[in-house]
Image: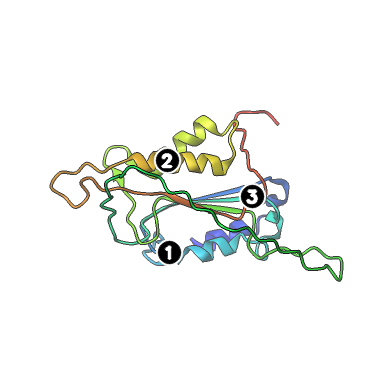
């Protein structure tokens, strides 16, 4: 997997493209997925292959990573919902940018990335034996319906909302009434719209 990513990161075509999408569907543990050879690949190594230092042709371009894999072995038994909402506020703070002495623009090593995961750290990801992964199913459905006019991060919020509503049905097993919660992290610096189906 890493050798393929190394090859992919060096493609000169990236300079002609607007973005990059990597989808990984495998078994996994916290922070890593299994390759076809049975060896663990650290997700950070995957991200590093396409970061600003290792793939300059993708600098300032959005890079999307979708990972369907367990991130541990804990099943989420869920909790009963109670009425009431709690509002919390956090104090704001300001920080000024450091001066640019030499006039050159510097980039963080990793930026302009959005990483979506099927489940939370430490948890198993769930699937339907007939229809497959909950996460991939909801991800493809949401993106196919909303990519024409919705920012990628907002679509991932919709995916989260769908996953939140799902519940395992496997009477007599540890997965009966189990829950899953997808999540994403983002270092995107602008809104990202895919506009599929629209001519350039």
Q: Circle 2 is placed at which residue position?
A: 161
Q: Residue furthest left?
A: 172
Find the distance from the CA under tag 2 to the CA under tag 1.
Answer: 25 Å
Q: Which mark is residue 32?
A: 1
Mark 3: which secondary structure? Answer: loop
Q: Circle 3 is placed at which residue position?
A: 62
Find the distance from the CA under tag 3 to the CA under tag 2.
Answer: 24 Å
What is the x, y in percent for residue 127?
A: 31, 45
Residues packed near mark 1 inside 10 Å, few (<14), some (14 to 19) or many (20 plus): many
Between 176 and 2, the residue placed more toward the observer is 176
What is the x, y in percent for residue 115?
A: 52, 53
Mark 2: which secondary structure? Answer: helix
- Tell me the quadrant of the picture where the C terminus can be found: top right
Q: Is residue 135 left or right of residue 66?
A: left
Which mark is in front, 3 or 2? 2
Of the two numbered discs 3 and 1 on the same chain, state the one appearing first in sequence. Answer: 1
């Amino acid at each position: 997997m890493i050798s393929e990513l190394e090859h992919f990161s060096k493609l000169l075509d990236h300079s002609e493209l607007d973005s990059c999408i990597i989808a990984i569907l495998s078994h996994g543990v916290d922070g890593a997925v299994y390759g076809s050879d049975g060896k663990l690949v650290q997700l950070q190594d995957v991200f590093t292959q396409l970061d600003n230092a290792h793939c300059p042709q993708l600098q300032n371009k959005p890079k999307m990573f979708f990972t369907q894999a367990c991130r541990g072995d804990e099943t989420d038994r869920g909790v009963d919902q109670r009425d009431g909402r709690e509002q919390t506020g956090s104090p704001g703070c300001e920080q000024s940018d450091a001066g640019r002495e030499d006039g050159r623009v510097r980039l963080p090593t990793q930026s302009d990335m959005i990483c979506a995961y099927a489940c939370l750290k430490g948890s198993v990801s769930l699937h339907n034996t007939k229809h497959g992964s909950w996460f991939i199913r909801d991800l493809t459905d949401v993106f196919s319906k909303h990519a024409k006019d919705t920012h990628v991060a907002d679509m991932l919020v919709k995916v989260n909302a769908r996953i939140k509503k799902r519940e395992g049905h496997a009477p007599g097993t540890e997965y009966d009434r189990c829950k899953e919660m997808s999540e994403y992290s983002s270092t995107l610096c602008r809104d990202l719209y895919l506009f599929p189906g629209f001519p350039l």
